[in-house]
Amino acid sequence: MDVVDGLRRIAPHLPRGLQTRCESTFDHFDRANRLLEIDREMASFRAITGEEEAATALMRAVQIRNYDGSEKLKASRHHHKAAIVATITAIRNTVQPILAEFQLVFDFAKGRIDLKIPLTTFGVAGGEDLCIQPVEPLGLLQTREGVHELDVYGEALDEFARKTEPGTIIKLINAQANARNRLLYASDEALPQSRATASTIEERKQRALAMLVLTVMVFQSRHHLDLVRQALATVLKVI
């Protein structure tokens, strides 16, 4: 099933505040794609806003489930949303090689999204047709010898930032938080100009969809999940 279709169908199962952020995310990206050929700057503006709406949805889900420190997150602050996007991207870059293949399973009757992982991911020969399914998709704890469990993803975030043009996580977050303003206001030297393409808008959309999937996964569990605790600790350290 297409992830967008699955999320559209599962959104009504969410609290109203999460549902509206999901619907707004879809709307922004739909409009961004229609605007691209006639108003590139506004297309980029819509795409950035859609990504931020998804980050807000994830932020609110964490707060609804009352994770420690979640009250410090403010949806009105762009750099908080930028920190969430950067952290999720860094974690995805870390986890993706481990979970090279996985399948999302949408349960519309229960309003859940689950995860199936083929046994071949763990080097089991002939395990293509056999999968494991965690009780909760985000109930996974990543550890590293000599590193506190809440610091595990800090290194991944720093590594991600080093590979970007600003070079540090603070500069990266500040640049992303101010991205929309740079699209709309002229400088002393030039008019605003967007470099957005269909490809870059799609990249933002995929990040946004990942955050909406995580939003559902966070909300569906009344227990505090290890991966969420680790990710939130990383976000809180940089905001």
Image (spheres, rainbow, N blue to C red):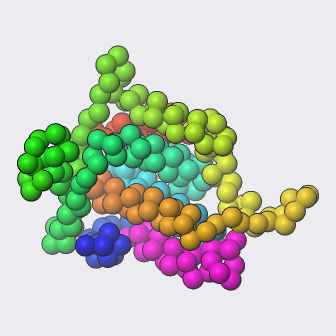
Q: In this view, does 14 lie to the left or right of 203?
A: left
- In the image, 82 versus 239, the foreground residue is 82
Residue at 53% x, 33% y is: 158
Counting from the top left corner in percent of width and height, residue 205 is at 47, 65
Residue reaching furthest right? 188
Counting from the top left corner in percent of width and height, residue 77 is at 59, 52
Q: Quadrant of residue 20?
A: bottom left
Decide: is 197 above or below 211: below
Q: In this view, does 36 lie to the left or right of 188?
A: left
Q: Is residue 160 left or right of residue 193?
A: left
Q: In the image, is residue 28 part of the stretch drawn in magenta?
A: yes
Q: Is residue 142 left or right of residue 110?
A: right
Q: In which quarter of the image is residue 201?
A: bottom right
Residue reaching furthest top? 146
Counting from the top left corner in percent of width and height, residue 78 is at 60, 53
Residue at 19% x, 72% y is: 108
Q: In the image, is residue 52 part of the stretch drawn in magenta?
A: no
Residue at 17% x, 40% y is: 122
Residue at 41% x, 34% y is: 153
In the rendered image, which quarter contains the C terminus? top right
The stretch of residues the image draws in magenta is 19-43
- In the image, 49 versus 44, the foreground residue is 44
Q: In the rendered image, is residue 84 in sight?
A: no
Q: In the rendered image, is residue 164 in sight?
A: yes
- How many marks are shown on the rendered structure? 0
